[in-house]
Amino acid sequence: MNLREIAKETAKTLQSYLTYQALRIVLVQLSETNPPLAVWLHNFSAGKVQDGERYIEELFREKSDLALRIMTVREYIAAEITEFLPEMVRTNIQQANMEQRRQHLERITQLSVFEPHPDNNLDNPAG
């Protein structure tokens, strides 16, 4: 297990997600100030935000001002969340793991309550 590589891939995924969130914010802003441009950006962005950096590159070729705006918003979001994100992620994973374990334990204990034990043969009372 290469933790550095996992961290690198996680950072790239988070970067793409923050690009998506920045796009959403810019779309809301544009829908209020320039609805036709918001429609254009929405249509342009459909299915392209999975890889945030490739999306930004493509947007630069079409409308560099929008690419810069999304990058600025993305950078702002990243700066604001980095303080509490690591602890939040750890806590959420711990809570989710505990809930999954609890549900699993409930399932397996319910199964064992309803399954007859091999020593309790109801068909043969003498046995």
Image (tube, grey):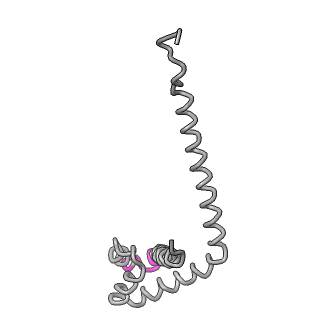
- For residue 46, side relative to residue 6 (left or right): left
Q: Residue 45: percent from the left, percent from the top?
A: 36, 75
Instruction: Answer above or below: position of 28 versus 95.
Output: below
Observer-nearest residue: 109 or 79? 109
Q: Residue at x 39, y 73 (%)?
A: 50
Which stretch appears magenta? 30-37
Q: Residue 42: percent from the left, percent from the top?
A: 37, 74
Observer-nearest residue: 125 or 40? 125
Q: Residue furthest top?
A: 126
Observer-nearest residue: 47 or 83? 83
Q: Is residue 35 magenta?
A: yes
Q: Residue furthest front?
A: 127
Q: Residue 11: percent from the left, percent from the top?
A: 51, 77
Determine if residue 32 is in view.
Answer: no
- For residue 10, side relative to residue 39 (left or right): right
Which of the 4 image quarters holds residue 106? Answer: top right
